[in-house]
Amino acid sequence: MDIITAIHSRKSIRKFKPDPVPKDIGAAMQNLCLAALNYDLGTCIEDQSVLYPEVLRKHASIPDTKRIVIAIAVGYPDWDFPANELISTRESIEKNTTWLGF
């Protein structure tokens, strides 16, 4: 499994706002995950990397001048792993959504 991290320079953005997160990061993550799926790779978006940046910095050689925003684990899924057989029930969309103007 590999980890892909989203990082940006701390210096380049501080002049605009204190520590903002790039607004297009979600779109970039979605497209990366969809591209990986095209190659039969599984992905898992990992926000825990923000909580333990020293571990990620050590293994991925990310300097302190970069801010870790999010990480994506990428690898080949093990479809025989028991957790992958779990089926959970969900509330219907009607119970969780209010449609206005449609």
Image (cartoon, grey):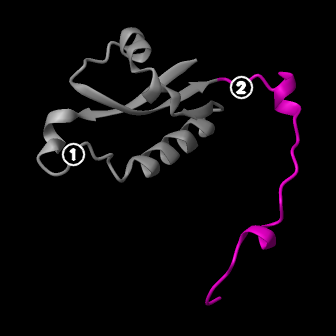
Q: Which residue is at a point 40% across and 21% down the rendered structure image?
A: 53
Q: In the orientation shown, which residue stands out farthest toward the bottom? A: 101
- Residue 35 percent across, percent down from the top left: 54, 41
Q: In which quarter of the image is residue 11?
A: top left
User: Label 1 sits on what residue type?
Assistant: Pro
- Residue 26 percent across, percent down from the top left: 45, 49
Q: Which residue is at a point 30% across and 30% down the rendered structure image?
A: 67
- Residue 33 percent across, percent down from the top left: 55, 40
Which region of the structure is painted magenta? Answer: 76-102
Relative to 18, residue 50 above or below: above
The quadrant of the image that shows the C terminus is bottom right
The reply to whether the magenta stretch includes residue 93 is yes
User: Label 2 sits on what residue type?
Assistant: Pro
Q: Report the disc number at residue 18.
A: 1
Q: Main secondary structure of the magenta part?
A: loop
| Disc 2 secondary structure class | loop
Q: Which residue is at a point 88% across and 41% down the rendered structure image?
A: 87
